[in-house]
Amino acid sequence: MTILSYYLILLIFTISAASALFLGLKIIRLI
């Protein structure tokens, strides 16, 4: 596994975690 693919996976994980947090906050506000 190259360093580039490692950074790519890390970037995708960070974006998905951030979007999940954002959706969670939106749902909490709706309730």
Image (tube, helix red, strand yellow):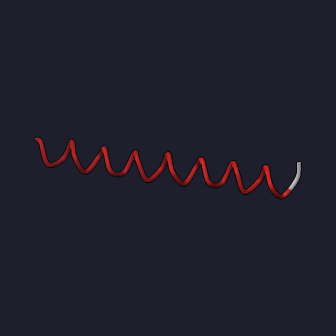
- In this picture, residue 26 sits left or right of residue 1: left
Tell which residue pokes out farthest to the left in this image.
31
Q: Residue at x 84, y 58 (%)?
A: 3
From the top left corner, tell me how far across and down residue 27 is, in percent.
21, 42
Measured along the vertical axis of the image, is residue 11 above or below residue 23? Answer: below
Q: Residue at x 43, y 53 (%)?
A: 18
- Quick one: quadrant of the C terminus? top left
From the top left corner, tell me how far across and down residue 22 is, in percent.
32, 50
- In this picture, residue 20 sits left or right of residue 24: right
How many numbered circles does the render carry?
Answer: 0
From the top left corner, tell me how far across and down residue 28 is, in percent.
18, 47
From the top left corner, tell me how far across and down residue 21 is, in percent.
36, 51
Q: Residue at x 31, y 44 (%)?
A: 23
Q: Residue at x 12, y 42 (%)?
A: 30
Tell which residue pokes out farthest to the right in this image.
1
- In this picture, residue 4 sits left or right of residue 16: right
- In this picture, residue 25 sits left or right of residue 10: left
Measured along the vertical axis of the image, is residue 1 above or below residue 7? Answer: above
